[in-house]
Image (cartoon, rainbow, N blue to C red):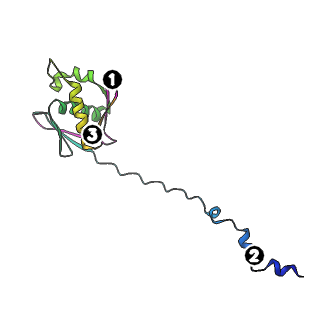
């Protein structure tokens, strides 16, 4: 009996198929494309009206009064010196600038109100508590464009 017909019998796949690697081994790893740099987000437009200490962010009303003055102080610090951290003590020392009453300043309550208002907007601006009496003013990587109207 001749061994050749058995070797090339149709029951066996061709040798080229048997020697080839399975499909999953033939696939070369695809290097993910480097993501295109994200376009620079437009700066946040912040307008402040000292008459009633109201603040508008991108044309939308945010807050007014003492909480608005606190926001304006924090926004100026962030824009001018890129300082994000602050304390309630610093705010109390700036009582005259913020218009805090001498007897009961309620800085904590006003700061909490501002925190909640920023959270309601669900935008890039946030105030996060880091520890007792210490906070961080977050702008979400955006630049602030500040404009104060004449009193």
Q: Residue at x 71, y 72 (%)?
A: 17
Classify residue 66 by image quadrant: top left
Residue 148 can be seen in this image: yes
Q: Nearer the viewer, mark 3 or mark 2?
A: 2
How far from the left and from the top, in percent, is residue 19?
Answer: 73, 68
Determine the CA span between mark 1 and mark 2. Answer: 77 Å
Mark 3 nearby-residue class (10 Å; few <14, some 14–19, many ≥20): some
Return the residue at label 2: 12
Sequence-first disc among 3 and 1: 3
Mark 1 nearby-residue class (10 Å; few <14, some 14–19, many ≥20): few
Q: Which residues are magenta?
A: 130-151
Q: Image height check: is 17 above or below 145?
A: below
Return the residue at label 1: 132
Q: Secondary structure at mark 2?
A: loop
Q: Secondary structure at mark 3?
A: helix
How far from the left and from the top, in percent, is residue 104?
Answer: 16, 20
Determine the CA span between mark 3 and mark 2. Answer: 69 Å
Residue 83 can be seen in this image: no
Q: Residue at x 16, y 22 (%)?
A: 96
Return the residue at label 3: 119
User: Which quadrant does the N terminus fall into?
Assistant: bottom right
Residue sitting nearer the eye, 4 or 1: 1
Q: Secondary structure at mark 1?
A: loop
Q: Residue at x 27, y 21 (%)?
A: 89
Classify residue 138 by image quadrant: top left
User: Which quadrant does the C terminus fall into?
Assistant: top left
Q: Image height check: is 15 above or below 138?
A: below
Q: Residue at x 81, y 77 (%)?
A: 7
């Amino acid at each position: 009996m001749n061994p050749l017909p058995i070797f090339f019998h149709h029951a066996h796949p061709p040798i080229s198929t048997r020697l080839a690697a399975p499909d999953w081994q033939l696939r070369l790893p695809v290097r993910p494309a480097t993501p295109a740099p994200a376009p620079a987000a437009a700066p946040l437009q912040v307008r402040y009206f000292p008459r009633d200490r109201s603040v508008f962010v991108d044309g939308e009303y945010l807050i007014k009064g003492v909480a608005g003055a606190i926001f304006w102080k924090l926004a100026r610090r962030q824009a001018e010196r890129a300082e994000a951290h602050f304390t309630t003590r610093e705010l109390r020392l700036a009582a005259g600038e913020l218009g805090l009453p001498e007897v009961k300043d309620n800085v904590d309550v006003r700061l909490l109100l501002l925190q909640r208002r920023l959270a309601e907007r669900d935008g890039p601006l946030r105030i996060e508590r880091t520890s007792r009496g210490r906070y961080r003013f977050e702008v979400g990587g955006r630049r602030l464009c500040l404009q104060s109207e004449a009193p």
